[in-house]
Image: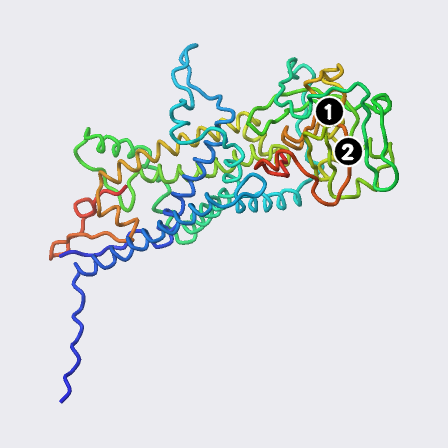
Amino acid sequence: MKRIIPKHHLAIRWFHWINFPMLTIMIWSGLLIYWAHDVYHINIGKATVFKFFPKGLYTSLGIPHHLAEGMAYHFLFMWAFILNGLLYVLYTLVSGEWRHLWPERTSFREAWQVVLYDLHLRKEQPSFDKYNAAQRIAYTAIIFMGMGSVITGFAIYKPVQLNWLCALCGGYEAARLEHFILVIGYCLFFLVHIFQVIKTGWNNFRGMVAGFEVVNEPDQLTTTTNDTHEQNA
Amino acid sequence: MSKTPKKKEPLTIEQKITRRTLLSLGTLIALDVIGIGIWKVLRKESYKDGVQKTLRKGLDVNERIFSTTFSEGRKAKEYSIAEAAKNVRVNGHVGLDKQNEDWTLQVMRTQGEPLSITLDQLKALPKTEVIFDFKCIEGWSQVSHWGGVRFSDFVKAFDLTAGSAMNYVGLQTPDKQYYVGIDMPSAMQEQTILAYEVNGAPLPPEHGYPLRLIIPVKYGIKHLKRIGTIFFSNDKPADYWAERGYDYFSGL
């Protein structure tokens, strides 16, 4: 017997699907800005092993010589990005959804077990309710990263009027680097997230679109979480 | 005898799943199409001052927010002389081509003839030094050391308070090739100077000899080199980079 189990509330789904294009626009317009002074690179010893970013990436995305446009986009869409993020956080707090998302005391230990399971280095899937330990940490961390982007962003945007914020970030140059590192973080998050969503499959993905999951239940109701729920992503 | 209307069969669980999935997926796809449509319109919009109209509006809204919340009391961080760069970065030559020796500063007064002010007259006024992190709109910054006349002192000394009561001050190079507009609160902030020295020496030509604007509450694009004319206005004066897609306010 199939059953429909509510998963993600409509509000959460809206926040999620609005955030995706907003963050994309912020990263793209940020790249238009970064290009004008693209100083970051990874060095091992004295040798540069990677430069942010290679010329090929710039030209393939049409990045060069759009600083003014990049700033105009960035400082318009930032308001939408901030508002959406703010509403999401408020919603999770007011609805109590935060209880599913906030890491528990055991989450940090369990997250390793989740990673080991995902890498097929552990057979049994660690137990979880709505989100597993790794998800709790990831989905909470991403919110703090978002806050970090807003804080470092304003520190760069208004380093005189908000000089206290700029000082809090360790100065103007430091704030710019932190702002940049957070973007790299989003890109890594995105890669893992997409991989996990594909791996976990349709039922889970539908949860973020239609809001429910379908569960196969034996006629005699014996509820276990792990056997019936697909793993979330 | 009329037939009783056919009773609707209750939906099976499979039908419910399909319906709800298609409805939600359809909504998401429809919203995506709308979103992409809006994006395409935005990208292809006609330009106002070098950037799409809607984006220009966005910049203007931000300008309103940050000019009304502007506080003169919040100062750009200052540094010691030892921290100042010895080689001060040069990043633009517009308006610096012609070097005429008989330079005087032209100041348009609200009433009466324009003032013609020599460098010696400016040097006779109290000198203010500012060592701050000069920030270019491109993203780089450099601590540099400037000396000159505080703009607010200059206004008082030449009795220009009728001018400084207006909304904006405009500055132009002698050849009028480069020009900026500055909101008065930023111009009157105590770190804004008409600079004639860098690192304690007269400005070299590439830094705008004999006189340039140093305004730490703005990006470098507003720090006009080789000031020829200063005027006051209630309307926004023309601004070189604001005509080329940049934010008019450009406040930090």
Check the residue under mark 2 and report the chain it is in.
B
Query: In the image, what residue type sits under mark 1?
Result: Arg
Residue situated furthest bottom in the rendering = B1
In the rendered image, the quadrant that contains the N terminus of chain A is: bottom left
In this view, the residue in front, A126 or A201, is A201
- Front one among A122 and B52: B52
Marks 2 & 1 on one chain: yes
Q: Which residue is mark 2?
A: B230
How many marks are shown on the rendered structure? 2
At x 64% / y 17%, what residue is drawn? B88
Which quarter of the figure has residue A157? top right
Q: Is residue A222 above or below residue B199?
A: below
Left or right of residue A174: residue B237: right
Q: Secondary structure at mark 2?
A: strand
Residue position for label 1 = B226
Q: Secondary structure at mark 1?
A: loop
Q: CA distance from mark 2 to mark 1?
A: 11 Å
Q: Position of residue A53 (x, y in %)?
A: 42, 24
Q: Residue at x 47, y 32 (%)?
A: A32
Disc 1 sits on a residue from what chain? B
Viewer-side residue, A93 vs A4:
A4
Q: Amino acid at mark 2?
A: Ile
Position of the C terminus of chain A, as image quadrant, is top left
Q: Is residue A229 above or below residue B175?
A: below
